[in-house]
Amino acid sequence: MSESSTYDILNRIAILHSRSLAAYLHYAKPWAIQAHPKTQAVLEQMVADQLDTVDRLAALIMENGPVDPGEFPISFTGWHDLSVDWLVNKLIERQKRTIALMEQLTAELNLAPYAQAMAREAVGQAKGHLENLQEVAGELQVSPA
Amino acid sequence: MDPALLLLSLIVFLPVIAAIVIAFIPANQVDGIRYVTLAATAAVLALCGFVFFGNQGTNYDIAQAQMQDTFNVGWIPSFDIEYYMGVDGISFPLVMLTAFVSLLACGASWSITKYIKGYCILFLLLETGMLGVFMALDFFLFYVFWEVMLLPMYFLIGVWGGPRKEYAAIKFFLYTLLGSVLMLIAILMLYFAGDLQTLKDQYVAQADDAERPIRWSELNLGDAVNAKLGVKTLGRGDNSVVLIRKSEGAARALEVKVAPGDVTAANFDATGNVLSLMLAKDAKAADVATAINGNAAAANIVVAKGGDGSLSTAEQAVSLPAFKVPTRDANGVPVEKVHTFNLLALAALGQHTKVFDGVILGRSLQWWAFLLLFIGFIIKVPSVPVHTWLPDAHVEAPTPISMILAGVLLKMGGYGILRICYPICPHGGYDLMWVVCSLGVISMVYGAFAALAQKDFKRMVAYSSVSHMGYVLLGIGVWSATKGNAYVADYWNMGVQGAMFQMIGHGVSSAGMFFMVGIIYDRVHHRNLEEFGGLFGKMPVYTAMAMGLFFAGLGLPALCGFIGEVLVVLSVWKFSMLLAVVSAAVVILTAAYILWALQRVYLGAEYKGPHGDHITPSNGRENLIGITLLLFAILFGIMPYQTVLKYMDKTITRQTSDLAKWTRDVKQPELTLKEQEKTAPTTPPTANAALQPAAVEVVSSGSDQ
């Protein structure tokens, strides 16, 4: 990976949160998840936490420049209204990849201890979200929606 | 009372009655006012359904080409102005479209929150104007309705519009008024040049057994005009026995016309010299006895009304004056003219007499009349280069008014060209066919490129209307019934039917597209195409409806936009291959701007503009209106003949075949003569004087009695 500034790395972490699949599913309101209250609750909590993290990261980012809002990947639009269990599995899959990427980015923040601490906190939060999602996935396998 | 008179008048004036009712409702009773308006527009649509599909006496008959449900009541008899209405295959689909779009636009008006009372009153007046335009068969009455429609529209844009509403309203008003003034000049030209005596001379000169090109009974001339011509209306009624005693010694003294409706029995008793007719129960009988042999005639009429009760008979002796042979001036022009505003009579005059052939500035009077009327109507269509009012008016108008504007008002231009320009001024139509078709193609291409360049969503849809209405102009103008095509009118017929279908299809799809733009504008209050995106994820039902309606506008097969476009493009081939290729290529441009707009607005992962938190799924009212429009777009696309074409087929076929005959019998000999004059050696001017049409009589105030 090429050398990146703290500002760029924090922006990338912020985008991973604000433009996550969870954020998109909450934004686009697919009916399939709305019909499953437990999944909906986990998703909403996850998005709320992510937005909170983005706000805190943004305060740090704005000391050096504007916050990059980022964009949702266009591939998300192909998953409208798919079944809840498929979407939850997709969320888990992407969350694992996001955690791996965030850990990599966190390691690159060794010159900015405060930012690194905040990034580690975000990684921990993401792992907590992953556990919640896996719990929901287990429930869905027992009793499909 | 004639049921047609009652029912058609009710259709036209019911909105005005509702507007008067609303005037007495307190302005703060917003819901009450809205529901009265909705009820009135729904009642008009229901009434149209009842009158044309559910009432035996006024049912619309698809087998008939002529005007149906006609009535003619003197309005200003001293100037031959009549309250004369009716429907045929050209006007009937547009009347239905008007009633339908008005109801949906009324439903879309729930988003209007400012001055509801005034808005609803103006909306209803607008509906009356629109319906009146499509039903009026008297030119003066047509003009009145045309102007009645203009004023509510001006206020609806100017008061309820967007930020530049005053500019847009004034621009709309001035453009349309310019067209109206040109139309008024043409009306005066045709009125004062027209002479029914000449028409009758032509009619009388034709043999009885010939297939008469002039269909006197179909003109439905008013009683006052008939009296001047020596024609007397003897009685009207259904389920009647009509006995007519012909006068002694008159070989051809009386002509009895029963129209429309079946005569179940007809018998001529030579001994008593009595013609008896039994009319069918549902016959809309107008029994007209005409003295057509130049002699005075007398007749005894017995009308025995049937029905459930006992027969009641009434006998009246009728004296029919002889035709007055008009005194003619040196040029052979009748001094005593019988003028008319009757559109059907004017059409007969234009096609079968030379009264509109006088020369003004090197061109015939009807050529100038065509030009003036054509400019007036293409302003309304609108066609390039007089289209610039449309994008401004659309962008500033509130959503329901945009629906009305695109769905109905633009069709008045096409209707006017089809109903008035071509039948009344065929010389102009023939001579300017390339102008009409070229303007159509230019509008198609220019409108498509302009739509492609727009950043404003509503402006893009407005320019798409310019492009789509270009097809209408092209289809109407494809006068392929020429000598080179052996005067076969089939392809022109196809073009005109395509143009009419395009008007109906565009009425549905464009109203739908504007409604879809309005739905999102109501939420995010902007129309910048660059700042949309991702609506599919947030408003799935709305996006599905929008996709369907925009695809209908695009002209996708199995949707309403396809049929009209393909019929027009097919018809052009026999007229000009170049225009056919260009018009077919416009489909690519249409697909480009519509698909690009859909991509920018509905697709993508995320909404990029302001007020994203206001994006909520479409509500039940919006879904009902959108799905209704979409269903009709699909219905017209998969069943074009059963839903639209069969109602207009006979009328358009007859109009195009009539004009094809006119081309063969009138225009071609004239063209041949001109060619011979060009090739022949120069002759003294006096030798050709007899061939020249008579000069137009300059009418000054009071000179025309």
Image (cartoon, coloured by chain):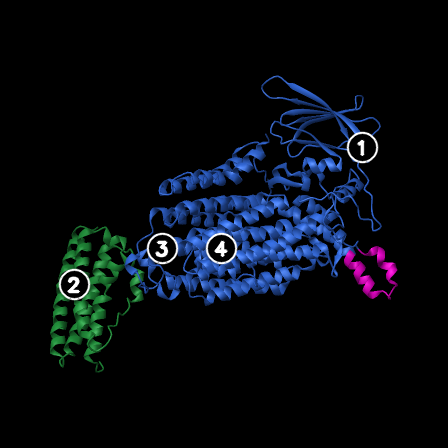
Magenta residues? B670-692
Is there a contact, CB below 8 Å, between mark 1 and mark 4? no
Residue at 31%, 57% in the rendered image: B615
Which residue is labeled 3 in the image? B522
Instruction: Give amino acid for label 2.
Output: Asp
* Subunit of label 4: B
Instruction: Give amino acid for label 4.
Output: Pro
Among the chains, which one is green? Answer: A
Q: Nearer the viewer, mark 2 or mark 4?
A: 2
- B425 lies above or below A68: above
**Mark seen at residue B252:** 1
Instruction: Give amino acid for label 1.
Output: Arg
- A7 lies above or below B472: below
Element type at mark 1: loop
Q: Nearer the viewer, mark 3 or mark 1?
A: 3
Q: Is residue B284 left or right of residue B168?
A: right
Horizontal and vertical percent position of residue B281: 61, 27
Instruction: Give amino acid for label 3.
Output: Asp
Among the chains, which one is blue? Answer: B
* Subunit of label 2: A
Which residue is labeled 4 in the image? B557
**Mark seen at residue B138:** none
Element type at mark 3: helix
